[in-house]
Image (spheres, grey):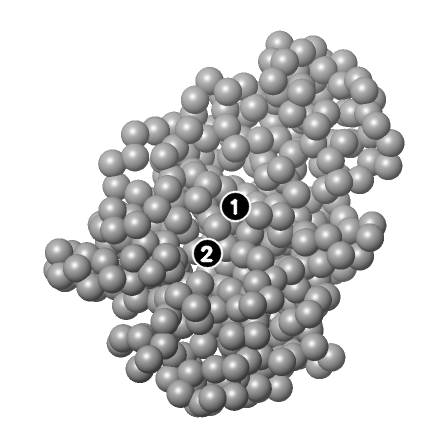
Amino acid sequence: MHHTHFLVREPLLDPQQRVVGYELSWQQPAPHAAAPTSPAPVIALESLLTFVASHVIGGEDGDTWLLRDKTLFLEAVPEMLSADALHRMPPARTVLSLPAAVLADPDTLQAVHALRAGGVGILLRHVSRAPAGLRLSSLASYVEVRFSGADVATQARAYAALKQSGLTMVARPVSNWTDFDACAALGLNAFVGKLHLTPRPGSSARGLNPAQTFIVQLMQMVRENADLAQIEAVLRRDPTLSYKLLRFINSAGFGAGREVQSLRQALTLLGYAPLQRWLTLLLATASSNGYSPVLLETAVVRGRLAELLARDTLGKSEAEQVFVAGMFSLLDRLLGMTMEEVLGAVQLPDGVIEALLTRSGRYGPYLALAEACELNSDLVAALAIALKLRPEDINRAHLQALAWAQQMAG
């Protein structure tokens, strides 16, 4: 299937700031094309569904949902409601977003009823009120509300009726943490766009906690190619770290192919570059900040996506460094430090530092491209061309990175 569009994702947070799902949409690359609000053509939306289905379902049996507990929200048009690819998606993890106005068509209404009966989620947009004579709750599982931080009391009253109906309300746009907190207080889920990339005000953590200081020390040893026996001796001082290392290596994500029992065996099997990558993951997960779940998941997806994009051109071991750059690109926010402080605390290779500070050098452009896939930015196409990457390769890597991040979280 030839792709002309790029896949963009946006996280959906529940009131506890957990990532409960992602909205995936096609981005039209040409900035001079129709306004971004105009829906993509039917054929493009159908191909999105088919493409997504083929990459988020896999495993030994060929029908495992690779995104574990995440729900996917996909933009839809009435013609798509009977698409074959829909049958491949797990109904409980699939939500189609439709403008409420399309329910005026009896055929569409019937198709929506059929999907709901089969357990597929429907999110209705632009709902001013329930269409005449219809119970919203029988048609939709989600309803999108336009959130404006203006008058919370009025909004609370407006949502009360919707809440009674048992629908999950999803707010958008939510562009600052104050609005997010207001949404959370009203019990709304929220699509957060790039909000999660901005530091949460008043978060207490500053600098490295003891666990992180320990990991930084290990990273230093690995970077200096210290003797494996020395690294093992240091790891032994922290049993939880050793446990996590073994669990990581034996996870599906790493694929060592056999059960690894000892630290020595683990270190020998991993080698230095993957060990560096693993410690980076651990440094981020050892963060004690209040808003880490969505940031952490973004960091892992970003790191993995940048790594996959770089792999063919730079090779496996340099791509490991690109992963580290991707993870570190959000470490300042995860640790509540400035990027300069982070780079002061951890010795990193020059190529990684260059990528982090100016998105330049050998690794920088891959990091920039992975970042652009998180936002609906016009940069994706330009960066893709510069790196000689085709849209379908980027889209495939994007979904693979999303799936990989879920395996890591398990």
Label 2 sits on a secondary structure element that is strand
Image position of 341 with respect to 198: above or below: above
> For the view shown, which residue lies furthest in the front direction?
133
> For the view shown, which residue lies furthest in the right direction?
258
Query: Can you identify the residue that label 1 sits on?
Result: 297
Q: Which mark identifies residue 11? A: 2
Q: Position of residue 118 (x, y in %)?
A: 60, 66
What residue do we see at 35% from left, 46% from top? 15
Q: Position of residue 359 (x, y in %)?
A: 51, 56
Image position of 218 with respect to 106: above or below: above
What residue do we see at 47% from left, 88% from top? 106
Any part of residue 388 in sight: no
Q: Are marks 2 and 1 in contact (CB under 8 Å)?
A: yes
Q: Position of residue 282 (x, y in %)?
A: 57, 31
Q: Which mark identifies residue 84? A: none
96 to the left or right of 67: left
Q: Position of residue 13 (x, y in %)?
A: 41, 51
Identity of the amino acid at label 1? Answer: Glu
What residue do we see at 62% from left, 20% from top? 241
322 to the left or right of 54: left
Image position of 85 with respect to 132: above or below: above
In the image, 368 versus 162, the foreground residue is 162
Location of the C terminus by quadrant is: top right
Whole-number angstrom distance, CA of label 2 to CA of label 1: 10 Å
Any part of residue 81 in sight: yes
Identity of the amino acid at label 2? Answer: Pro
What residue do we see at 77% from left, 25% from top? 267
In the image, 192 versus 383, the foreground residue is 192
